Image (cartoon, grey):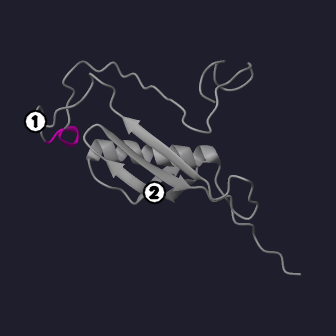
Amino acid sequence: MKKRDLKHGYTTGACAAAAAKGAALMLRDQALLDKVEIVLPRGETVRFRLQGQEFDRDAASCFVVKDAGDDPDVTHGAEIHARVTLKSGLGADPRVCPGRTHGFAPTKPVTGEIQLEGGAGIGRATKPGLAVAVGEWA
């Protein structure tokens, strides 16, 4: 029997990172993206196809369909969604600084704060031992 190489799949986290990057770039650039690249922890750059892309002035969203490769699990084919939203009061006005940072400049001071929230199917850490504190999104 001829041995063949297994097709590698991607973790749910990699798919979530790709979807989040895609949504953030669409919000920043105010343009639809078909694909996005991320660098995996092992140093490999991979490309993900984005689906369900939507954006407006204050938010963008998309999803990646998880490919588990030749060793699929229950998450194979799952839609991993991400939505990036400008926090109220930190919006940008494209008229303030056209041409810089893709036409966006903060209209109010930006603290650099990023807030992550989970959606349906994402739980919170209930016990110590994860990479996040108890009570944070897992």
Q: At label 1, which amino acid type do we have?
A: Arg
Query: Badge 1: few (under 14), some or many (20 or more) residues near its Cα, within 10 Å?
Result: few
Compute the Cα span from label 1 to label 2.
29 Å
Q: Is residue 104 magenta?
A: no
Task: Identify the residue at horizontal 61%, vertical 43% (top origin).
Answer: 13
Task: Identify the residue at horizontal 43%, vertical 50% (top origin).
Answer: 62
Residue at numbered disc 1: 95
Confirm or deny contact between disc 1 and disc 2 (CB under 8 A).
Answer: no
Residue situated in front as seen by the camera: 73 or 109: 73
Residue 10 is situated, as x and y percent measured from the top left of the image, at: 64, 54
Asked if residue 63 can be seen in this view, the reply is yes
Task: Identify the residue at horizontal 57%, vertical 38% (top origin).
Answer: 120
Describe residue 96's horizontal placement relative to residue 62 as left or right: left
Magenta segment main secondary structure: helix
Q: Earlier in the sequence, mark 1 or mark 2?
A: 2
Tell me which corner region of the image, top left, top right, bottom left or bottom right, holds residue 122: top right
State whether residue 111 is above or below residue 41: above
Asked if residue 40 can be seen in this view, the reply is no
Q: At label 2, which amino acid type do we have?
A: Leu
Residue interval drawn in magenta: 99-103
Residue at numbered disc 2: 50
Which image quarter is the N terminus in? bottom right
State whether residue 115 is above or below residue 25: above
